[in-house]
Image: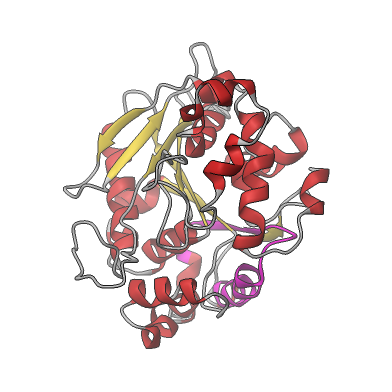
Amino acid sequence: MEFLSTIQGTELPEINTPTFLHFIPQLLRNPLIQNPTPQTHQYGPFPSQQLDVYIPPTGMNPAGQHTKPPVFIFYYGGGYMSGRKQMSLLSPGGLTVYSPNLTSLLSSQDIPDLRDDPTIVDRLYHQNIGTFLASHGFVAVIPDYRLVNMDSVYDIDPENDALFPSGAEDVTLSMKWAVNNLSEIADTETVFAMGHSAGANHLATAILLPEFIPSDPELMSKLKKWCTLSATFDYIHSREQRKVAWSRYFGGFERIGERCPSSLARGLGDGEAGKLPELLCLHAKRDHFGAVDPQRRFWDAWVERGGKGRMEVVRGGSHNHMSTVYGVGCGDEEVEWWLVDVLRWCLEQ
């Protein structure tokens, strides 16, 4: 954890590569992450509509007082334009857009296992999240969703490219799939969901817009609580790349203000948020300003409309926008505290 405080800056181009380089060697020593057995399923008709399911190890008791493991669904981030349930870090098409030099930097590290087989870093993310959740007595579900096409010239392909509200559609479909297909191995009456960064925005949209999760009363009754981590609930200009991605997802720069989660929360009627599941709204102490300030505005609107829950800074004072996710599974309890806290909150009556 101490190393994270030495990383200069808070924006993704500044933090992403050093955070990766710090945690990857530690995750490579975790046999659960290296040898997972997730089951991959198609939850919708489009190529990106796939999800991975992680089951608790044999002999593991279900979390809490449940006779079967509760369902925990995690929606990763990636600025609307990148990310995968199993990220191929070393393939040209799989590289995170924020760490284009990661391959060369990793190859220069003195890591014997990595030197012998560079592909062992593939799929560390987000297998680290799935295996951690499963090891704590949950059936973990990590869906893919459609991403923004960042090509300079392109035509929208609705089967592959994200365009508002496709994120909410993918969230709703994947949650319905989990509830309808996992009852033999999980307590599908008890579902928790968490999104990180752009994934949190998609989750919030699916919960706030009445045509998605709220349109299915049975699904709503099973979603007990939800959590957002470092969400970017409205737009703050920084990098041109962010402006392009947001503009393409929301259907034009001028549409962001009316379609972003902060605006959707303000658009709820009096008391309507009180009818929605309880929310844990989190950010890191060293998060970038594009997450911290919008979160305050979203939270104010949520509470004003009757929403229940808590807004907190995660434990671990040096965490940045990505270390919360990249560090899970490293074995350092201080790094992983925040996710243990989330799971405890989920199980509170």
Q: Which of 214 and 169 is in front in this view?
A: 169
Q: Which of 178 and 195 is in front in this view?
A: 195
Left or right of residue 188, residue 240 in this image: right
| Picture residue at 40% right of the left edge, 66% below the top | 205
- In the image, residue 280 lies in the stretch drawn in magenta: yes
Up-down: is 286 above or below 219?
Answer: below
- Residue 137 belongs to magenta span: no
Q: Position of residue 269 (x, y in %)?
A: 43, 80
Quadrant housing residue 202? bottom left
Query: As rendered, which of 71 and 33 lies closer to the eye?
Result: 33
Would residue 322 be visible to someone looking at this image? no
Q: Which residue is drawn at 29% across and 46% down?
A: 176
> Quick check: 170 left or right of 282?
left
Q: Is residue 84 above or below residue 299?
A: above
Q: Measuring 61% from the left and 70% from the top, which residue is drawn there?
A: 295
Residue 129 appears left or right of 191: right
Quadrant placement of the C terminus: top right
Magenta residue span: 275-302
Find residue 255 and report its image quarter.
bottom left
In the image, residue 254 above or below residue 333: below
From the image, which quarter does the N terminus lie in?
top right
User: Residue 134 location in percent, x, y?
Assistant: 51, 27
- Residue 326 percent coordinates (x, y): 60, 43
Residue 92: image location, x then y, percent: 39, 46
